[in-house]
Image: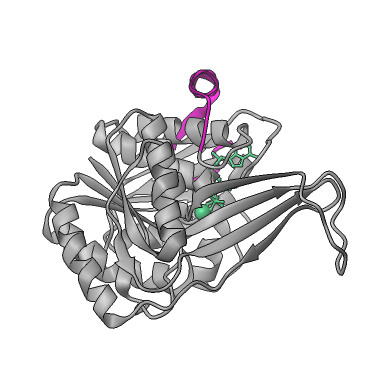
Amino acid sequence: MITTVTLNASIDKAYYMDEAICNGEVMRVSRCRNSAGGKGLNVARVIKLCHEDVLATGLVGGYNGQYLESLLSTDGIAYQFGHVSGETRSCINILDPQYGSTEYLEPGCVITPEEEKCFIELFQDIIKKSDIVTISGSVPKGLPCNIYQRLIQMIKNEHKKVILDSSGESLKEGLLAKPTMVKPNKNEMENLFGIEINTVEEVIQYAQEIAKMGIQYVVVSLGADGAVLVMKDQVLRARPPVIKPVNTVGCGDSMVAAFAVALQRKYTPKEALAFAIAIATANALSPETGSFEETQCLEILQQVKVKECEKGEYVCH
Ligand SMILES: Nc1ncnc2c1ncn2[C@@H]1O[C@H](COP(=O)(O)OP(=O)(O)OP(=O)(O)O)[C@@H](O)[C@H]1O
Ligand SMILES: [Mg+2]
């Protein structure tokens, strides 16, 4: 079973507007859609669409927390959350014809040390029944910034696999516990090293720095340019076909989900990368976040190009 961790969950509200939004005015929303949000829950939805067993965990609280659980039930996703006394936040995404997407993200509630302790106990049980765990997104206030490091250590102590997809300090701290796989995008990689990356060769060079820390699979996603998968002694570069994206939010989450499924199915690195690119690209063609059409994904898979880069020669177009 694959478990997804979402510590900073939210009720995601999409407001679809017929007209451009205007600051300081009363705006009427033409259509509204609520979903269980947070990056790990996008991952869970995609794993479910891949027909693999998935369990969503993390922290939820209050009426919004109950609502989030009911939304997951509707999606047929099993969950086992730690419950906190604060209210799960809402994140609003206003979609209008002029500005596209305008997001308002609530700060979320503060987690207490007692709530953290209860979650750690619950998580210990969850690890035992999981084969692979994915950890995604930001850390809520109140939790220490090395919480991911601690969770990864717990997972590795049980000899299970773990994929980390985060940014900033929580990524930096998490890497110290050597997760099985990390999936930064170019931006997250730049922030990690405090540098600017301009070429794929540089992406590979810095990914190799991460691999040297003892991380088995380093995937750097590059949006429409595809991704690289860097391992100790192998570098793979993959490119998706050119598409007209509909919604690229959650493409990275879809990629994480696909890699978790690939690890579960013991795909080779080449197969895993091609599969992940196909699912992530299919997600870009779907209006919903954390969703894809199976037939579209299979078509894309035929067109994904994966190339092994020779040592010392990383120009692989
Ligand atoms: N415009 C696009 N065309 C084709 N494929 C895309 C496009 N955007 C994203 N993808 C696919 O999705 C993968 C992940 O995208 P990206 O690098 O944008 O992740 P991300 O920034 O982590 O996204 P998020 O955090 O919003 O989920 C890419 O490697 C690629 O396979
Ligand atoms: Mg991402």
Give whichever of 62, 6 is nearer the camera. 62
Residue 31, given in percent of the width and then of the height, sits at 71, 43
Q: Residue 271 location, x and y as percent?
A: 37, 29
Image point 50% across, 47% down: which residue?
252
Q: Which residues are magenta?
A: 291-317
- Please state, as top left, top right, bottom left or bottom right, where the N terminus lies in the image: top left
- 301 within the magenta span: yes
The answer to which quarter of the image holds residue 102 is: bottom right
Q: Is the residue 218 above or below the residue 195 in the image?
A: above
Q: Is residue 210 above or below residue 46?
A: below
Report x, y in % for residue 258: 40, 37
Q: Ligand 1 falls in which quarter? A: top right
Which of these two is toward me, 204 or 152? 152
128 to the left or right of 300: left
Front-lying residue, 156 or 2: 2
Q: Residue at x 56, y 50 (%)?
A: 200
**Could you tell me which quadrant the C terminus lies in?**
top right
Instruction: Let me know if residue 9 appears in the view.
Output: no
Q: Residue 138 location, x and y as percent?
A: 45, 66
Q: Classify residue 196 as left or right of residue 62.
A: right
Quarter of the view holding residue 270: top left
Q: What colour scheme was applied to this rendering of the protein?
A: one colour
Residue 226 seen in render? yes
**Most foreground residue, 231 or 299:** 299
Q: Residue at x 24, y 46 (%)?
A: 132
Q: Residue 96: say if magenta.
A: no
